[in-house]
Image: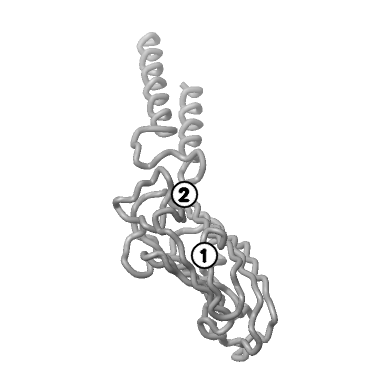
Amino acid sequence: MRSIIILVLGMTTVGTANAQTMFLSISSDDYVVTNVFSDVDTFNIDIEINMPLLPGTFVNPDIVSVVYSVSGTLVAGTPSGFPAFALQRDITGAEFYAQGSSLSFSISPNAVLSDGIQVAELAGNGIVFTFNGKEIDNGRFHPALLELNANGTGRIQNSDNVPVENPLQQVDFGEEYITDLMFDPGNTTLITGTPGAPDPKRRGSGANSSLGITLLLLLSLFVAVNRRLS
């Protein structure tokens, strides 16, 4: 009986390890970029979200990691005084939120999850996705604010920063760079489920289904053994 209990616990652990997460990926390669102020047209944002790929509203969801970069050349006279910059961040979700950053979007109830989430499957009519890499008191002028609209337009620009410790590092939205974006909402994928994770719409399938069948078989075996011994 002890062996059966150990095996059941082991199978339960395996089933739990297959919990699904979302992977959000944005690259300048997927957009038509138009420089409005300064010349910043290279950026990448990769975020792993510790939640299953399902319809719903996500405002500052639980994040595993954030890896993003943005780079370009700047016109003279911006608050930083830099001729160019290359910002790269590789941080945890806790660090992302602690520095003042935020993330928000809403997946439509009618979204088809099997091929990932395209911008057209985000709920809303105006701004449907916001990534704000704002950093407070980190001495940075170039963290990105990226917004996407339902109509296939968007913008990436520097976020604002009103530092508490050093007023000389203050910068307002777009004072360093502004770049407009155009894209096809129906063909621009933002979010996918992690590879190998079970499809959340298929209840009773995948690892959870296998675990259930295994537990039933073990329970039947346990009952049969007890009957023979009694």
Numbered label attached to residue 192: 2
Numbered label attached to residue 89: none
124 to the left or right of 34: left
Q: Within the image, what quadrant is residue 60 found in?
A: bottom left
Of residue 209 and residue 103, the one placed in the foreground of this image is 103
Q: Within the image, what quadrant is residue 37 found in?
A: bottom right
Q: Within the image, what quadrant is residue 225 found in?
A: top left
Number of numbered discs: 2
Q: Can residue 42 be spotted in the picture? A: yes
Q: Which residue is mark 1?
A: 32
Q: Position of residue 121 (x, y in %)?
A: 36, 55
Helix, strand or loop status at disc 1: strand
Q: Position of residue 47 (x, y in %)?
A: 53, 58
Query: Is 103 placed above or below 73 here?
Result: above
152 to the left or right of 84: left
| Furthest-left residue in this view | 109
